[in-house]
Amino acid sequence: MKLALVGHGRMGQAIARLAAERGHIVVATVSGQDQRDGGSLTAERLAGAEVVLEFTRPEAAIDNLLGLARLGARVVTGTTGWTEALPEVSAAFMAGGGALLHSANFSPGVQLFLRAAEDLARRFAGRPEFAAYVTDIHHAAKRDAPSGTAQLLRERLHRGDAGRDFPVSSTRAGFAAGRHEVVYDTEFETIRLTHDVRNRDVFAAGALNAAEWLQGRTGVFTLDQMLFGEDA
């Protein structure tokens, strides 16, 4: 499969390495320095890529995605912090005849973790003696806080228990690839549900799985639909 990378940071580099191991070809790479309001994303620059993987910054993602939608591209994006524009971006992809798969986190384990958290919240609903909160820990270079995954986690917890606030505590320090934890706490006992990333290659592998799945499809999709065959 021919791939284009928009963004060449840690994720872009990990994707490029794993893509080569799987026999895919990266035909174009657009770094952050090359981007000017999505204007560098031309059909010529993308060099016939079958799928584009977009992992950049929140402030760049919307223009990138709208530009790719106009080209009718198939795109996998893991950039977070832009989903307030999802209706506009989705409409652009539908109009352009391309495809978009978006997710704040491409780890299959995280998707199962989110489901487990929702089930746990449902079981703790109506038990006010348990204080509930979320912790979100990432490396010092992580830009957004709370993370996109922490926001998804909070949404899923609210599905299970709409009566709780589930405050999020975010820490940006050191080199942690990512840890998310749901905590239920009382004076006498504590229950924790934790997802801990040991290697960011899990995200790169998940993004490549999404790119392979997206071939031949049109529309707008989430990782839930890819993994579980369900609507978002």
Image: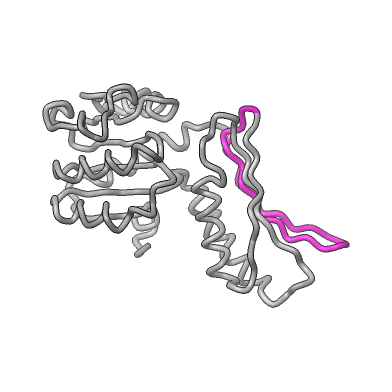
Name the image quarter holding residue 122. Answer: bottom right
Q: Residue at x 12, y 32 (%)?
A: 43
Q: Residue at x 31, y 44 (%)?
A: 62
* The N terminus: image quadrant: top left
Magenta-colored span:
174-197
Magenta-span inclusion, residue 195: yes
Q: Residue at x 18, y 53 (%)?
A: 218
Q: Nearer the viewer, residue 65 or 188?
A: 65
Compared to 162, does 68 lie above or below? above
Q: Nearer the viewer, residue 96 or 37?
A: 37
- Residue 14 percent across, percent down from the top left: 41, 26
Magenta-span inclusion, residue 169: no
Compared to 122, does 177 lie above or below? above
- Residue 39 percent across, percent down from the top left: 20, 32
Q: Nearer the viewer, residue 21 or 156?
A: 156
- Residue 34 percent across, percent down from the top left: 28, 23
* The C terminus: image quadrant: bottom left
* Residue 57 located left or right of residue 122: left
Name the image quarter holding residue 231. Answer: bottom left
* Residue 24 located left or right of residue 230: left
- Residue 212 percent across, percent down from the top left: 27, 41
Q: Residue at x 55, y 29 (%)?
A: 141
Compared to 167, does 73 lie above or below? above
Compared to 127, does 202 lie above or below? above
State the residue lying farthest toward the bottom.
126
* Residue 195 located left or right of residue 56: right
What colouring does the structure picture have? one colour
